[in-house]
Amino acid sequence: MRYPMLLSLGALLAMSVGAITPVTAQDPALIEALAPIMMLEDRRELNPAVFGQSLEHPEAQVRRAATVAIGRIGQRDGVALLIQRLQDRDPGVVTDAFFAMGLLKDPRAVAPMLARLRSGDSLEVAALGEAAIAFARIGGPEAIATLTSIIGGGGGDISRERREQMLLPALLESWRLGKDAPVNAMLPYAREDDTDRRWRALYVLGRIRAPAAGEVMLDGLRDRVPLIRETAARSLTKAFTDTAGLSASTVLGELGRAADDQDPGVRINALGAIGTFRDSAQAGRVAPLLNDPDRNVRVAAANALGMLRGGEAVAALEAVFTMRDPGWALERAALGALAQADTAAFHRQVGSWLQSSDPLSRANALQLLSGTRPGDAAVFAAAMNDRDPRVRYAALAGWAGAGPTHREGAAAAARQALRDPDPLVRRAAIGALDPATTPSDIDLMVDRWRGGDTDLREAILAKLGALARAQPDLLAALGTPERRVLMERPSDPTLRAAARRSFPALATRWGAGTTVETGRTLEDYRGIVRGLVLAPQSPRVTIVVEGRGDIEVELLAREAPLTVANFLQLVDRRYFDGNRWHRVVPNFVIQDGDRTGLGSGGPGWTIRDEINRRQYDIPMLGMALSGPDTGGSQWFINLSPQPHLNGQYTIFGRVMGSYNPLKRVTQGDVIRTIRR
């Protein structure tokens, strides 16, 4: 929630918004009605007067915006306001009311929702779907009973027609119920001819590891539809196999066959599942896939060999480094796999990466080196003199994580690194201080708190919070005159939120407030409404990836205007140009937005979440988070349906056109540019 930093760039934001598309004539009254809603949502302020008026506004768009805002603000007092919207004359408002109730997760919403569903008047299919999703998010006996009756096809007072229209979302969202999911009612759908029902049932049964689903999961691995084979392959792990009472040899035989499937996604998921068995005898099946035509299948094969271990796996992994052109991603995967499988083999190969001319390779080698073998302090110490701050960061973090024998040396290096010119390294230095931090170390942190950036201060809060759990009198020790600066309540809401998470006693001392101080004026919100929410067309960008092609994206400005404005601001600054995809999980997600390439960087601010009704069913752009309202510059695209991400990460774009360039991306690939 580093909103003040974002708003200090108000002129740039306004320029970005204004450049999106020519805006046609707009109703000034509509702008004046929508802007205060956005402001209150941003401030997390449930103002009854403003929302009461907005929810009765003659324009449905205003009522819908207010309804969604109440859900996003997250205060359960909003339930009473949402109940009224269930009777709204506009079907879109009713749909959004169900959605918002799901965000609030208040059991008091279940009874009025059921009453609305039992009424005889019309409800759109979208509203029925959001009602089913809301029941799953809220949980509790009444909601679970309702979902069970929908999936089971009988009982309850909801009409048969409505139950049928709610079936698909009810099936899919039942994963949220865990052990309370209606497994017996779901099992028949796993064998249905209808692909949508079959896939949803298998997804949930696999995710909750339903013991009764073993045979239907094996059947799914032989399904004619690739997505269902992918889902079954991902589910058939060692843990699921044991829970379902299946024969490990039978499952491994089927997974081995799936590893030769014509669909790359099936091969990737099968390899991941094979690895979980930790059976070195499977290496012979996996090793040939290091030469698969699909680059990400090769990476998945390397990852699986690291889990399988054994001589055959190690030999295959070492052979990667003799290939003519294995590619950065495969070498990185093979090196990480060797770190798991055989530390001696890992040390035979890591030297070339430590001496690489590529700073990202050196940094990755240091990250992997941590914990593989005692006695490497000299390597970490030497890397602390590297000219590239990413390497110094990785050296310090790796040194600190290398085990108790390295603790003293890492802490000494951390004290020196607190004076490093690079903020990334200074932040790592705080984390690397000895867990039994001395009073002088606390004084160092207090000194760095003065004038430190927000990221550094967050690291200090995390370290002090950890110390406070072991030293109950720490807060009193921070109250001395020379340390009193920590007792002063910061204006940055990000720091106050961080303190609530990691150092609650200090947050209490500062004084808590529910309203977020954004620093934005009402005119700022008018500009975003005018340039994004009411724009006649959605903005589009092209992600140009070297050697992989162009990824075309439509940004969802109406559903997530602040997130889109933030993203376009970074695009216009060329923030992403030259970045390397720092995280690629085959057939799951690709992630960028960190200029360090290590997954630890950000723009210097954060923005709040804008959870919306979009779902990760097709490749979508989502904000990467480290907790609620912590988005900044890092974003991801899902490579396959990922229902468990729905409602957790803001969706602010969707991939258009061909998905082929997207699926060719591997870790370390370079984004040449992102252009409008």
Image (spheres, rainbow, N blue to C red):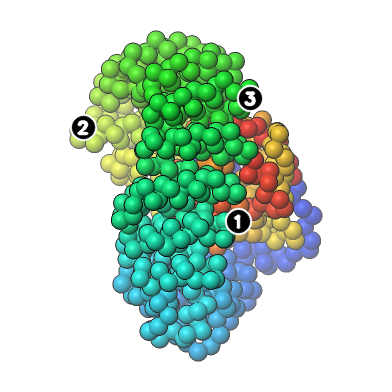
Label 1: which secondary element: loop
Determine the CA span between mark 3 and mark 2.
Answer: 53 Å
Residue type indicated by callout 1:
Ile
Question: Which residue is identified by label 1?
Answer: 618
Horizontal side, residue 623 vs residue 105: left or right: right
Kind of residue at badge 2: Gln
Residue 89 screen position, x and y as percent? 58, 81
Q: Nearer the viewer, mark 2 or mark 1?
A: 1
Q: Residues within 10 Å of mark 3 (few under 14, many from 20)?
A: few
Tell me, yes or no, if residue 290 can be seen here: yes
Name the residue: 43% across, 32% down.
306
Which residue is label 3 attached to?
325
- Real-space Cα separation, disc 1 to disc 3, in angstroms: 32 Å
Quarter containing the C terminus: top right
Q: Considering only order in the chain, which callout, 3 or 1, is on the residue closer to the N terminus?
A: 3
Which of discs 3 and 2 lies nearer the camera? The answer is: 3
> Residue visible at 53% across and 65% down?
68
| Label disc, if present, on residue 471 of the rendered structure | 2
- Residue for point 30% across, 56% down: 245
Above or below for 601 versus 118: above
**Residue 291 locus on image (x, y percent):** 58, 33
Badge 2 vs badge 1, beta-carbon distance below 8 Å: no
Q: Amino acid at mark 3?
A: Asp
